[in-house]
Every structure is written in C-alpha cells, then in structure tokens.
C-alpha cells in the first residue's frame, strides 16, 4: 500500500514538474543563459512541490502502458512550451519596436547582446528588452507569469486531447496584436524620422552644396536618442500594461 502511494505521488509530482519545468526554460527572466540551470531547476521543483496537493487530485491515473505514459508527459511538455512561447510573444513587441526605432535614429547597425532574445540584436532593442525585464520584476509582474502557468491546469486539463486549433488561433491573434502594439510604441520615433527626413530632403534641395550626410547623421542620432529618453518612461509603462493584460486571459478569477 505504501509502495503504491509513493509511486503515485512521484508520478504526479513529475507530471506537474514536466509542465512547469518546460515553461521555466522559456519564460523571460527565468530562462536564458544568465540564469543558472541549478537555480531554475530548484525553482521549478519548489513550485511543483507546492502545486502537488493543489492539482494532484485532478491528474489522470498512472497509465498502464509505456506509450500512454510517454504521450502524457509529452503533452505536458508541449503545454509548458506553449505557455512560455506566449509570454515570449508578449515580450517580442519590444524587439519589433526597437528595430523600428533603431532604423529611424540611425542605429540599426549597432549591435549588442540581448539577454531576452539570447542573440545579437540592435542596441536599442537590447536596451528596451533589458529595461522592460527589470521593470517586470520590479513591479512583481513575474508573479503573473508563474500564476498563468499554475492556473493553466484548470483550462488545459492533463490527459485530455490538446486543443491544437485553439493554440494556433490564440498564437496567431497574439502575434498580430503584438505587431500592432509595437508600431504604436515606436510611433513617436517613426514620426520623428519622417519629419526629419522630409526636412533633410528640403534642405538638400535648397542648398545642394551642403554636405548633408556629415551634418545630418550626428543630429539624427542625438535627436533620436533625446526623444527616446523622453518617451522611455511612458513607453515602458504602456508595455507593462500590455504585458499584464496579455496574461490576464490565462488567469483564473481571484
């Protein structure tokens, strides 16, 4: 009897850990090269242990066949990965907005390492991503990410067929909304770039002898960085609101 209880508890524990641990690999701020694997593993194990008495009773029984067990754990890993990708999609608005902003102020070819995307990105993109990530943890919005993963057990029940059509539709709508919101974030700098380039074209027509390139580029960079610093607080505030509202559909009512 004790052997059966221990076996079921270990099975349920690792079933919960599969979804939560996979999500922790992808979630911004928890995954990535800057977070030690040991820290991420300990955190995922701790959350799984806390969730065991909460959702353990709703988990399906231990499958009698190995194929059923592999399919069940694979489904849980896919759900965790999907939840992490959705959260990364919310963060991707800053990548798109930073690319637009860098193009308008003349810093498209300035690259630095982006800790969120884990790749070489535009300096403006990496700067916005890092500032937003710090703001997320400062305002405790990272709690919403973890809560969205834990509340997913009430929406996506383990052992049930995966709603792949709903997954694809939700992700496609979120990608479209993320691109539109990125354009809204970059709108002040886009307006600056359009006005500046129009004024530059008029100046080159009026005074062809002026070396426009040597004069315009430093002014474009300086003016664009000044406008970015002025708009940065509002930009981050709007992003935090967008990030919070993007996680609400995956949360259960309090």
Image (cartoon, grey):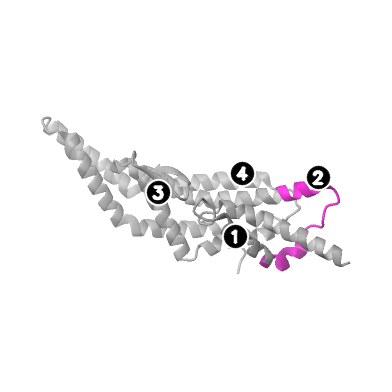
Looking at the image, residue 216 sits to the left or right of residue 79; the answer is: left
Q: Answer yes or no: do the residues labelled 1 and 3 have beta carbons within 8 Å? A: no
In the image, which disc is placed on residue 148?
Answer: 1
Q: Quadrant of residue 149?
A: bottom right
Tell me if I can see residue 100 in this picture: yes
Q: Quadrant of residue 57?
A: bottom right
Q: Answer yes or no: do the residues labelled 2 and 4 have beta carbons within 8 Å? A: no
The residue under the point 51% across, 45% down is 175
Query: What span is in magenta?
Result: 50-74
Q: Quadrant of residue 210?
A: top left
CA–CA distance in space, label 1 to label 4: 18 Å
Residue located beneath label 4 in the image: 168
The residue under the point 72% across, 56% down is 15
Residue extending furthest toward the right:
1
Tell me if I can see residue 183 in this picture: no
> Which quadrant holds the N terminus?
bottom right
In the image, which disc is placed on residue 126?
Answer: 3
Q: Answer yes or no: do the residues labelled 2 and 1 have beta carbons within 8 Å? A: no
Q: How many marks?
A: 4
Residue 22 picture location, percent across and down: 63, 52
Residue located beneath label 2 in the image: 67
Is the magenta region chiefly helix, strand or loop? helix
């Amino acid at each position: 009897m004790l052997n059966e209880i221990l076996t079921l508890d270990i099975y349920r524990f690792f079933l919960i850990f599969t979804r939560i641990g996979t999500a922790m690999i992808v979630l911004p701020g928890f995954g990535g090269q800057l977070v030690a694997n040991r820290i991420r593993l300990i955190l995922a194990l701790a959350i799984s242990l806390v969730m065991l008495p909460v959702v353990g009773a709703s988990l399906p029984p231990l499958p009698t066949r190995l194929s059923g067990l592999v399919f069940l754990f694979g489904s849980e890993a896919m759900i965790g990965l999907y939840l992490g990708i959705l959260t990364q999609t919310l963060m991707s608005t800053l990548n798109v907005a930073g690319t637009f902003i860098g193009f308008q102020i003349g810093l498209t070819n300035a690259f630095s390492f982006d800790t969120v995307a884990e790749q070489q990105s535009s300096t403006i993109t990496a700067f916005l991503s890092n500032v937003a990530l710090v703001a997320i943890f400062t305002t405790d919005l990272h709690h919403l990410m973890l809560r969205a993963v834990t509340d997913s057990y009430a929406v996506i029940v383990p052992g049930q067929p995966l709603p792949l059509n709903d997954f694809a539709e939700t992700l496609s709508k979120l990608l479209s909304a993320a691109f539109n919101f990125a354009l809204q974030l970059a709108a002040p700098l886009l307006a600056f770039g359009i006005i500046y380039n129009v004024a530059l074209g008029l100046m080159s027509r009026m005074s062809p002898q002026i070396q426009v390139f040597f004069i315009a580029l430093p002014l474009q960079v300086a003016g664009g960085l000044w406008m970015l610093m002025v708009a940065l607080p509002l930009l981050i505030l709007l992003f935090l609101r967008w990030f919070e509202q993007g996680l609400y559909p995956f949360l259960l009512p309090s």
